[in-house]
Image (spheres, rainbow, N blue to C red):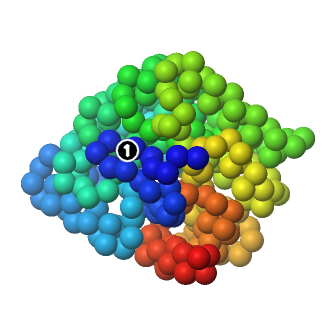
């Protein structure tokens, strides 16, 4: 495996655990990031996330939660691109853009994004070409079905091997489109068309994805699997999420996507102290 992941003007050290802090951009959050007070607010928000320990920031303008309605492309562009133009020149860490749409990927690359995070693993029209035309890394995530219906009846005969086979196919599709392996990050997609048992099987087997030779990203933070295990509502899942993050680190995940950045940083420090 490579030592670093090149993300625009940044290099992520793959021998350290990287914390990807989630910033979900809602319609009213900073939709006109070009305006001065919104610009200051946006920069302060990013600065707080970086001070808390985020080493990547993932911004997304489309909800990929089960059952969520699709966001039209223009609306996603309006939410994400002005914000990105404001943040990218000054942000001290790479900004990843959570999108599945080719048009948003191309605009994000032009506006200073350092990574593309795609829950559709570049299966939407034009997405492979949009990433190929940039020099950005991309996270390929596994999902069974479509966001709106994926949790209705997830089914696998062997979840680990099916997810692994899917990721292998998407790596091949990327390479055929001119996206080199050095730009690819893999993610089993916790909660995306999976029952609790599927999610647990994947998390237990996470280290089994390392033979693909690419960095692994795990996104478990606050998801329903934590709720199912702990019985906690979404805002009270921090402890369960941190334990799951620690378990993922122990399995060798290099990038952990989280809401609770400061709490996860403590876990990373504990992990690094204990594992040397
Ligand atoms: C509470 C909070 C309950 C959030 C559910 C959620 C992943 C991802 C998402 C992931 C990668 C989410 C965009 C779902 N999850 N990208 N995105 N990996 N790479 N749900 O696991 O956070 S959105």
Residue 54 percent coordinates (x, y): 39, 65
Name the image quarter holding residue 233: bottom right
Q: Residue at x 43, y 61 (%)?
A: 21
Q: Residue at label 1?
A: 7
Question: From this viewpoint, is residue 257 visible?
Answer: no
Q: Is residue 90 visible?
A: yes
Counting from the top left corner in percent of width and height, residue 94 is at 34, 51
Q: Quadrant of residue 52?
A: bottom left
In the rendered image of this protein, does residue 75 appear above or below residue 47?
above
- The x, y position of residue 263, in whole percent, is 49, 77
- 28 lies above or below 131: below
Crowd class of label 1 (few under 14; some 14 to 19; many from 20; radius 10 Å)? many
Residue 19 horizontal side relative to residue 196, left or right: left
In the image, taking residue 88 as reference, residue 184 lies left or right, namely right
Residue displayed at 57% across by 64% down: 221
The residue furthest right is 157
Residue 68 vs 172, above or below: the answer is below
SS under mark 1? strand
What x and y, as percent, mark residue 166?
Answer: 71, 33
């Amino acid at each position: 495996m490579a030592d670093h992941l090149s993300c625009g003007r940044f290099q992520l050290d793959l021998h350290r655990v990287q914390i990807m802090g989630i910033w979900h951009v809602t319609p009213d959050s900073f939709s006109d990031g070009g305006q001065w007070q919104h610009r200051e607010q946006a920069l302060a928000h990013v600065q707080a996330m970086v001070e808390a320990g985020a080493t990547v920031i993932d911004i997304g303008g489309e909800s990929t939660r089960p059952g969520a309605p699709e966001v039209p492309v223009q609306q996603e562009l309006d939410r994400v691109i002005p914000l990105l133009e404001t943040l990218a020149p000054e942000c001290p860490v790479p900004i990843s853009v959570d999108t599945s749409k080719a048009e948003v990927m191309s605009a994000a690359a032009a506006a200073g994004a350092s990574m593309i995070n795609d829950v559709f693993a570049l299966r939407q029209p034009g997405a492979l070409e949009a990433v190929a035309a940039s020099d950005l890394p991309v996270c390929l995530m596994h999902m069974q079905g479509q966001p709106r219906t994926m949790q209705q009846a997830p089914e696998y005969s062997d979840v680990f091997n099916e997810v692994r086979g899917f990721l292998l196919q998407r790596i091949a599709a990327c390479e055929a489109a001119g996206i080199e392996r050095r730009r690819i990050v893999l993610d089993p997609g916790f909660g995306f068309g999976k029952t609790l048992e599927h999610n647990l099987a994947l998390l237990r087997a996470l280290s089994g994805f390392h033979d693909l030779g690419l960095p692994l990203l795990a996104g478990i933070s606050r998801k329903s699997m934590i709720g199912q295990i702990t019985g906690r509502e979404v805002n009270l899942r921090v402890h369960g999420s941190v334990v799951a993050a620690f378990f993922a680190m122990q399995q060798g995940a290099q990038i952990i996507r989280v809401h609770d950045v400061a709490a996860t940083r403590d876990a990373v420090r504990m992990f690094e102290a204990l594992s040397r």
